[in-house]
Image (spheres, helix red, strand yellow):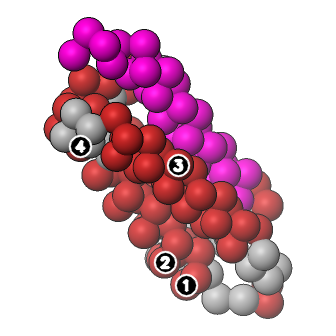
Amino acid sequence: MVERINVDYFYKEVCDSDYEFMLQTINGFNEYSLSVLKTLRELPEPQNKDSQEAVRLIHMFCGSIGLLGFAEQANELSQIENQLRQGVVPYDEALHNNVSRLIRGVSTELDTYLSIIKHRKDIW
């Protein structure tokens, strides 16, 4: 999984080689991820709601992970967003589980990067 984005790029370019900033970025992102998941989970049942809130949240999250270098996951979420926007699929339990898997996967990878960078920190 770690090969999905370049760890050196994340640390050196996104975080400007600032370990404390990287910690804040990852912690902030993890809090943001949990907030997005909670809000998506609390959306009313698909038959009683418009999926626009899910579209908005997925769109925002997609942009965030794209900026962090998670192009593959951003692409997958973008496809889901487009399907929701076009009314092709409802935001149901199965789709929520898929979106949750992607969001949690990004958080897990960031935690992995944190360990790698912490280990390499003294080398840089």
Q: CA distance from mark 2 to mark 1?
A: 6 Å
> Between disc 2 and disc 3, whose residue precedes?
3
C-alpha span from label 1 to label 3: 28 Å
Q: Are marks 2 and 1 in contact (CB under 8 Å)?
A: yes
Q: Nearer the viewer, mark 4 or mark 2?
A: 4
Provide the residue designation for mark 4. Answer: 14
Mark 3 = which residue? 27
Residue 63: image quadrant is bottom left
Amino acid type, label 2: Arg
Give the x, y percent position of residue 88: 56, 70
Q: In the depicted view, which residue is nearer to us: 20 or 5?
A: 20
Q: Which label's residue is closer to the chain start, 4 or 2?
A: 4
Which residue sits at x=54%, y=32%?
A: 111
Prevailing SS of the magenta stretch: helix
Residue pointed to by mark 1: 52
What type is the residue that disc 4 sits on? Val
- Residue 109 is situated, as x and y percent measured from the top left of the image, at 51, 31
Q: Is residue 112 left or right of residue 124?
A: right
Residue 91 among those drawn in magenta: no
Rounded to the nearest whole Å, what is the CA distance between mark 2 and mark 3?
22 Å
Tell me the SS state at disc 3: helix
User: Magenta span has 99?
Assistant: yes
Measured Cα–Cα span from mark 4 to mark 2: 25 Å
Looking at the image, is mark 2 or mark 1 nearer the viewer?
2
Q: Earlier in the sequence, mark 4 or mark 3?
A: 4
